[in-house]
Image (cartoon, rainbow, N blue to C red):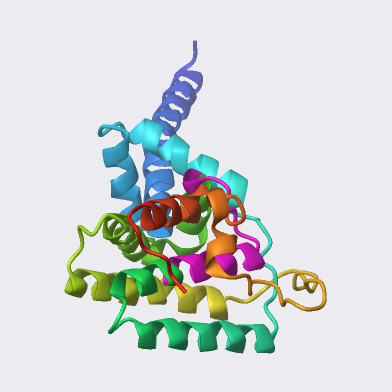
Amino acid sequence: MSSVVATTIVVVVALALVVAVALPALRRARLRRRFGAEYERTVAAHGGDRRSAERDLRDRLHRYGERPVRSLPDERAERYRARWAVLQERFVDEPAASLHSAQELLGRLMQERGYPTDVPENAMAALSVHHADVLGDYRAAREVALRSAAERSATEEMREALVRTRRLFEVLLTERGSTPAARPAPAGRPRGEEPVSRADAGGQRHGTLFGAAGRHFRQAGHHPR
């Protein structure tokens, strides 16, 4: 074997080793930039196994990265804001009910924008792909909402949860749509305007992500208006 051939083989092998080492690092860096704090949360959820966590995150990108977001007409956005103003004003007298209503309203908005609300894991995965920067706020707020259903949350804690929920609510209201808006609801009741009690009946209309809190809330003797 000539020295030229031997040198070429050594160079090729060295380059292959560099690529083998650098490529995973580059992929990891991209995932960190994309998911932010959600990256480390996912690693922790996988018991510190970064490979499994990164497979999970790549799978989310594959499933939801190109998911279209439905447009939201200006009049619908204003209606959502008006309903939020009502529940926020009610917070002083009924903090737990107001927080629950905020979660319900957010669920309707997510559904109208085209996000999955059938299973908590699907909803969180889709949100982590598109809005990882506010997902941590929402996770914390949802935990408080679930505890408030059993009267285990302090008023100040619920107030902070409402603020955290509002962050995702505003992001979803202003997100640019990539497909036409959802078809209007039948005459007599605009889409998303169902009474809270019906919208959450059995946790079916807006999925278990929001239905679970509603069931716990009513079982504890609360009946949001």
**Closer to us: 147 or 73:** 147
Report the residue that reaches farthest toward the front: 221
Asked whether, in this view, residue 114 is left or right of residue 156, the answer is right
Q: Magenta part of the protein: which range?
A: 102-121
Q: Quadrant of residue 86?
A: bottom left
Classified by dominant secondary structure, the portion drawn in magenta counts as helix
Q: Quadrant of residue 156?
A: bottom left
Q: Is residue 97 magenta?
A: no
| Residue occupying image coordinates x 75% and y 73% | 181
**Closer to us: 112 or 88:** 88
* Image x and y of residue 211, in percent: 49, 53
* Image x and y of residue 119, in percent: 53, 45
Asked whether, in this view, residue 155 is left or right of residue 59, the answer is left
| Residue occupying image coordinates x 32% and y 58% | 149
In this rendering, does residue 207 appear at all? no
* Image x and y of residue 176, in percent: 62, 76
* Image x and y of residue 58, in percent: 50, 42
| Residue occupying image coordinates x 51% and y 52% | 123
The image shows residue 224, relative to residue 84, as above or below, that is above
Q: Is residue 118 magenta?
A: yes
Asked whether, in this view, residue 149 is left or right of residue 128, the answer is left
**Closer to us: 140 or 193:** 193
| Residue occupying image coordinates x 59% and y 51% | 64
